[in-house]
Amino acid sequence: MTTRLDALTRKVQRASGVLTSAKRFHPEDDHADLERAVSAARVQHAVTKIMAESPALTAEQVASIVAVLQHQDHTAVGDAA
């Protein structure tokens, strides 16, 4: 039986493969959309894996993470004390 995490692993691999091929065969093209797709797939995979092993987050914790994903929190990693 295929798990959700297995499906997301394949999604990351597929997106990475498409980006790699595009860069190889069309280096002059803008690959920003493909790069975003790879990033989104990697984040989704990582979050799914973490949440499978963790208790549910509070609404405040979810809002804080959403802000990071929406680039509303511009604090560089390591700046928080």
Image (cartoon, rainbow, N blue to C red):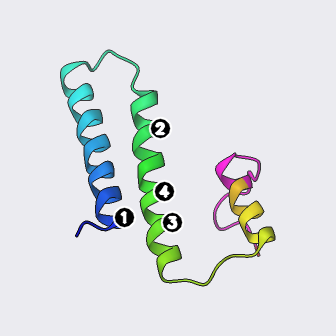
Q: Which is nearer the N-term, disc 1 or disc 3?
A: 1
Mark 1 to mark 3: distance in Å?
12 Å
Q: Which residues are magenta?
A: 67-80
Q: Nearer the viewer, residue 35 or 40?
A: 40
Mark 3 to mark 2: distance in Å?
16 Å
Mark 2 to mark 1: distance in Å?
21 Å
Q: Which mark is residue 36?
A: 2
Image coordinates for residue 22, horizontal then vertical, percent: 26, 26
Looking at the magenta stretch, what is its main secondary structure? loop
Q: Circle 1: is it few (<14), some (14-19), or many (20+) Cα within 10 Å? A: few
Q: Label 1: which residue?
A: 4
Q: Is residue 55 magenta?
A: no
Q: Label 4: which residue?
A: 43
Front disc: 4 or 1 = 1
Question: Contact (CB < 8 A) between labels 1 and 3?
Answer: no
Mark 3 element type: helix
